[in-house]
Image (tube, rainbow, N blue to C red):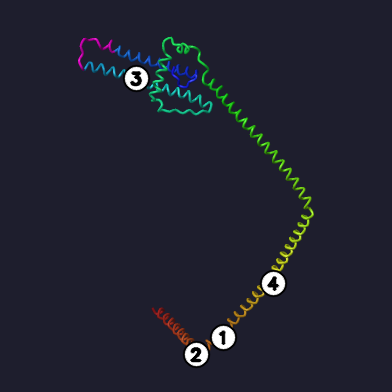
Amino acid sequence: MADFGFNEHHQNEAINYIHFARSKRALRLKTIDSCFQDLKDSRLMEETYTVDEVSDMLDGLQILVRGEVEMELINTAHTNVLLLRQLFSQAEKFYLRLQTDISELENRELLEQVAEFEKTDFKPNSKVNQESSKPKLAPLNEGGVSELLQKEISRLQEENEKLKARLKTLESQAMSALDNKSRAERALRDLQRNQGDQQSVMVAQEIANLEGTVAAMQSDFEKTLNANMASQKDLQDNLVSAKHDLLRIQEQLALAEKELEKKFQQTAAYRNMKEILTKKNEQIKDLRKRLQRYESDE
């Protein structure tokens, strides 16, 4: 028997599939034989035939045989797809992802091994062929569960051992850390007792320095605040003084304008201009009167 790396269960499954394929192939060959027999019975009735008649018979036979072979190939491909579907469905139940290598389907060496496997396991009265008629082993979804569960249990046990070892390591590290902490606390208490008085003096001195710094900062702040208030008062006084100066200058400017206007009215040019404007106004009045009389005459 050829060895493909199968266990006993997988070998039986392979034998069952080959048996199924052989039965389908034998049935299809019988159908092709019947095509030839039908041709003999229905068409070969004469002693001699023309070339056209022979060609016509062969064409009809070719169509029949081609249809049977094509149907068998299509059926085989579909059957293989259904077989893959079963395998993939069973694998998905256990979260397995199967992969196929299409190039291996044309490996001549493996194909020859399959042919040898078929010849060896399907000889008449062979022991394997007899065993194939016996009840099958447990299906994949039962035997596979036991095997996968065993592997999972083994993996979990290994992880458990690793976790236990890790836990022991962490416990030892924690105990060591606690010991170090205890020693450090004792050393700190001893140091505090030895340096308690000195530390108290240093703290008091530091507090006094801080109080002095705060007092100095407060004094500087008060000085700055007083200086700002004095500066603000000076600015307000300067603003009031500037407003008074502005009002005084505006009054002086108004008086200057009045005096300038009075002086201008007293000049000869102003008097002449005023006389000219008076004459012009009288002329305009005279022209209006004439225009009214003219319109009344019309």
Precedes in sequence: disc 2 or disc 4: 4
Q: Residues within 10 Å of mark 2 (few under 14, many from 20)?
A: few
Kindly report the distance in space between the C-alpha atoms of the residues bearing marks 1 and 3.
135 Å
Picture coordinates of residue 137 (x, y %)? 52, 16
Relative side of 283 to 202, left or right: left
The residue at 67%/72% (across/down) is: 231
Precedes in sequence: disc 1 or disc 4: 4
Precedes in sequence: disc 1 or disc 3: 3
| Label 4 secondary element | helix
The residue at 49%/90% (across/down) is: 268
- Which of 11 and 77 lies nearest the eye of the viewer? 11
> Would you name the residue on which mark 2 appears?
268
Residue type, numbered disc 1: Glu
> Would you name the residue on which mark 3 appears?
69
Kindly report the distance in space between the C-alpha atoms of the residues bearing marks 4 and 3.
117 Å
Precedes in sequence: disc 2 or disc 1: 1
Relative side of 269 to 50, left or right: right
Kindly report the distance in space between the C-alpha atoms of the residues bearing marks 2 and 1.
17 Å
Kindly report the distance in space between the C-alpha atoms of the residues bearing marks 2 and 3.
140 Å
Give the magenta part as a residue range.
Answer: 39-51
The residue at 28%/13% (across/down) is: 39
